[in-house]
Image: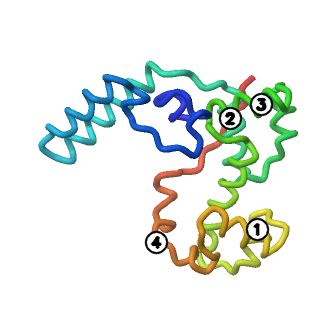
Amino acid sequence: MVAHAVLGASSELGGTVVALDDLWGREAVRVQERLRAAGSWEERFVIAEAALARRSDAGRTVDPEVTFSWGQMVASRGRVRVERLVAETGWSRKRLWSRFRAQVGLTPKRVAQLIRFDHAAHRLAAGYSASQVAADSGYADQSHLHRDVMAFSGMTPSVVALTPFLAVDDVAWPPKQASHPR
């Protein structure tokens, strides 16, 4: 949802690669020039962080209902039903789907699938069997888990289990609880 505030038109960008100057215009060129002139990685990170913070502060706001729905998906590890989110936000299914996709860039269903996959991948990396992970993560069966893992990663569950980045991913994605939008 930070991308919505910082980049803008997230739903139009799904599945594409876009140059930063196409999104930010002249500001991107100025930031890139400052990054090239920086003398260290530390200085580059400060420049990038400041540029992102400026864009975020001046950017679009995210609907509280979308933020709430995202939080519920993360808290449930992707196992929350869209009907429940519709009831709790007070929006129609169509409105939730539309606003969520416009602000996140994916549909609620796709986000829930990715969150569930992320949880499953971490469980696989922690040494749990594929059958146990499938049961714990809400998959219908082990073959359902296998299909999702292949679709999202291009690897089998046993290969995903050996992927080293999973050991540190919780640092970047700490679990959070969402508050209700009302």
170 to 54, vertically: above or below: below
Q: Assign the N terminus to one quadrant of the image.
A: top right
**Residue matched to label 3:** 96
Left/right placement of residue 41 relative to residue 161 reads left
Q: Nearer the viewer, residue 66 or 20?
A: 20
* Residue 136, disc: 1
Look at the picture and state if 10 lies above or below 79: above
Q: Amino acid at mark 3?
A: Leu
Judged from the image, the secondary structure of the residue bearing numbered disc 4 is helix
Upstream in sequence: badge 3 or badge 4: 3
| Sequence-first disc among 1 and 4 | 1
How far apart marks 2 and 1 lie (CA) works out to: 28 Å
Which mark is nearer the camera, 2 or 3?
A: 2
Mark 2 — residue? Answer: 101
Q: Say whether disc 2 or disc 3 marks the residue closer to the N-terminus.
A: 3
Q: Position of residue 179 (x, y in %)?
A: 68, 33
Q: Residues within 10 Å of mark 1 (few under 14, many from 20)?
A: few
Q: Secondary structure at mark 2?
A: helix
- Helix, strand or loop at mark 3: helix
Q: Amino acid at mark 2?
A: Arg
Q: Are marks 1 and 4 in contact (CB under 8 Å)?
A: no
Q: Residue at x 63, y 62 (%)?
A: 152
